[in-house]
Image (cartoon, rainbow, N blue to C red):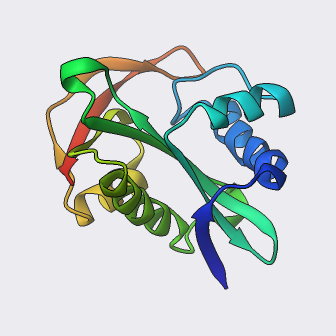
């Protein structure tokens, strides 16, 4: 039974593992540097909210939620999602996005915006559109793949 909840200090190692898998894949996150336990602890603590998907005590997926900008745009949130490769296709991504929408509302955000959804990430794009997110356009060549090729990114938003 998969549970989505706010993270706890004991979750950091599992969160770092899942996060680093997506970073290492190089096809969805803009980050290139992996986290260790200390940088992970600091990074996750700096977020407005971090949610984890837990199954039998193991972290299967996670997300971070934080302001997309400051000041007059501080009411717009941003989020990133990571699901471990062994757990993909089980609906965990949907659970994480739905939870982030609820947590975003609770935190007082009015919009959830994704700045850089890689155009080739068909599963994520389908999920976001199925949940009512709207694509704002396309930024040609906005993401550098591991092989050095550039692919488009697609910003999305959803009113909370």
Which residue: 79% across, 49% down?
9
Which residue: 24% across, 35% down?
75
- The image quarter containing residue 123 is bottom left
Q: Is residue 33 left or right of residue 72?
A: right
Q: Position of residue 67 (x, y in %)?
A: 37, 32
User: How many tags in the picture?
Assistant: 0
Residue located farthest toward the bottom when viewing the structure as drawn: 1
- The image quarter containing residue 72 is top left
Q: What is the quadrant of the C terminus in the image?
A: bottom left
Q: Position of residue 129 (x, y in %)?
A: 23, 58
Relative height, residue 155 to residue 90 (above, below): above
Q: Is residue 154 left or right of residue 19?
A: left
Whether residue 3 is visible here, answered yes or no, is: yes
Relative height, residue 1 to residue 17 (above, below): below
Which residue: 55% across, 69% down?
89
Q: Is residue 151 left or right of residue 45?
A: left
Whether residue 119 is visible here, answered yes or no, is: no
Which residue: 27% across, 28% down?
74
Relative height, residue 56 to residue 9 (above, below): below
Q: What is the quadrant of the N terminus in the image?
A: bottom right
């Amino acid at each position: 039974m998969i549970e989505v909840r706010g993270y706890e200090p004991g979750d950091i190692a599992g969160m770092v593992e899942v996060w680093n898998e997506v970073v290492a894949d190089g096809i969805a996150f803009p980050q290139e540097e992996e986290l260790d336990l200390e940088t992970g602890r600091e990074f996750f603590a700096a977020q407005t909210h971090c949610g984890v998907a837990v199954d039998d005590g193991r972290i299967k997926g996670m997300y971070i939620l934080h302001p997309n900008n400051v000041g007059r745009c501080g009411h717009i949130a941003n989020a990133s999602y990571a699901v471990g490769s062994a757990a993909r296709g089980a609906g965990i991504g949907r659970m994480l996005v739905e939870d982030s929408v609820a947590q975003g509302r609770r935190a007082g955000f009015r919009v959830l915006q994704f700045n850089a959804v890689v155009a080739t990430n068909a599963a994520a794009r389908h999920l976001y559109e199925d949940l009512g997110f709207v694509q704002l356009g396309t930024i040609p060549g906005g993401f550098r793949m591991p092989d050095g090729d550039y692919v488009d990114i697609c910003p999305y938003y959803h009113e909370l």
